[in-house]
Image (cartoon, rainbow, N blue to C red):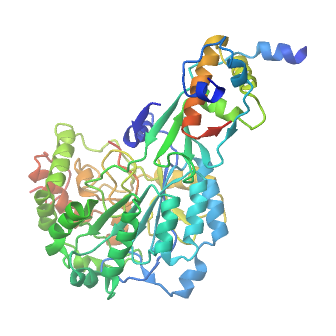
Amino acid sequence: MESISFTVFSAKFDSPPVKRIPIHGMIEVTRRCPLNCAHCYNNLPLDNQDALLNELTFDEHCRILDEISEAGCLLLTYTGGEIFARKDFLEIYTYGRRKGLLITLFTNGTMITREIADYLATSRPFCVEITVYGYTRETHERVTGVPGSYERCLEGIRLLAERKIPLKLKTMVLTLNEHEIWQLKSFVEDRLGLEFRFDPMITPRLDYSQEPLIFRLPPYKVLELDLKDPKRTSEWRRVAEKFTGCVSGPTSNKEVYYCKAGITGFGIDPYGGMSLCLFSPSGKYDLRKGRFSMGWEDFLLKARSQKISKQTKCVHCAIRDLCGMCPPNSEMETGDQEEPVDFFCEVAHLRAHTFGIPVKPHGECRYCR
Amino acid sequence: MGAKSEKEAKPKKPYVKPKVVRVQLTPEEVVLGTCKSSGGSGAGVLCRLCGAILGS
Amino acid sequence: MNWYEICYHPPIYTGHPFVKILTNLILRKSENTAFRKIGDEYILVPVAAAVADVESIFNLNETGAAIWDKIDGKKSLKEIINEIEEEYEAEGQQLENDVFEFVNEMMEAKLIEA
């Protein structure tokens, strides 16, 4: 039998003409979490009864899984909060597996038991991604705010790794743990033999609290990370090669969104609110009141087709893909989904300058000077 | 007889040899991926926040 | 050779004495497999460890998906071949060989059972 890689297979869905099919979904099963990470954008206490009572029930989850499968979802990521904070999570997961969904699990690892690991070994997820915040217990727990969380996280990693469940580790890079990033990377890649990635782009909370930004690295330190990691440097050079000489600017793109949210991606929060993206703090379709197909075909299509209402420096910026700017983050950080975010703008310009991507004038932008 | 004429009248589809291809489920490495972007869903520059993928 | 061995030793020549046995086979789908249609793609997703290989999914073309659709635990392989012949511009002998080869691969992957 002929065999192809998943990359080749999934490219079929990205080849033009790209059809609008909800292939990639992210579902937050809860925002409750046993940890209290300094940078987190959405966590609630584990025993928050209001949140618990308002979360989608098991039956509601099953109905949604039926509907998203029917609509064409193939890749589904479960995230939180902490997914295993839901006592019925494995039942929800099992239902999703039986629908033929390829499921990725995001978890902090601290609630993974032997029983959970044994179960996942028999009903394998596409991937499990565990976030670990430090090389040392001290640093990890400085981020999570919970004593004992480091050992529990490592135990969760061990339980899954010894059962050969597809596993990746990752971290957010904060002022609290940046000094241990390279040790952590080496530990994961060399000692554990697992893939590792890191992300320094901290966002505000979904309730618009700017507190997480206290721990965000300054832009020049984000560049230092890019330059110190050979893989990242190589990837950015590859991106730069793709963009060099093709600086046409997005003047023809008058939509607010320019990613594939709403084209092939969607998000569902713990309470049944569907949006283009899990990070959209506002603008949701209530799946408790309507079917997924209606939300996808009508509500999200309208949201995705929304046109810009004003000319900002981002509209004519050709290096927008280097900054990671997007409407939900603009909304969380500035209150306006079209407003530029200074931090991201500075990072993008530093990257462009570092990797040799020419930046055409695109309005009043102090980082161009 | 009516049913037989219906079958005969219905145009046949072009035939392609039946084929099944194995797709290896190896989540690809996502170097520039963010914490919240899923690492297993194809090529392209990733949206920094959600699992959606920026068009190339 | 018995029919079981023949299944795993293609090519199968029409006229072989065991072809008659093969075409009378009743096939059924593995219970541990979910069929998905995503856009224009037909996919089989193993959903439990019982299936030979849970580290893969399987991508069928349209004809393969049509055969899969017709497998219901009641129709013989011959009946399925006849239905495909009616719906597609396919020649009898070549079609039989193609279907046997396809069924063989599907059985090896434990996606269908006899």
Between residue A45 and residue B23, name the one nearer to us. Answer: B23
Q: Determine the image quadrant of residue A206.
A: bottom left
Q: Quadrant of the C terminus of chain A?
A: bottom left
Rendering coords of residue B51 (x, y %): 40, 56
Rendering coords of residue C36 (x, y %): 59, 43
Residue A278 vertical position relative to residue A351 in the rendered view, above or below: below
Between residue A369 and residue A42, name the one nearer to us. Answer: A42
Rendered residue at 41%/66% (across/down): A106
For residue A288, say whether it is visible: no
Q: Residue furthest front?
A: C1
Between residue A154 and residue A330, name the one nearer to us. Answer: A154
Q: Is residue C6 left or right of residue C73?
A: left
Rendering coords of residue B4 (x, y %): 85, 15
Rendered residue at 20%/61% (across/down): A190
Q: Determine the image quadrant of residue C66.
A: top right
Rendered residue at 34%/65% (across/down): A329
Q: Is residue C17 left or right of residue A365?
A: right
Residue A136 vertical position relative to residue C109 in the rendered view, above or below: below
Between residue A13 and residue C110, name the one nearer to us. Answer: C110
Rendering coords of residue A242 (x, y %): 21, 39
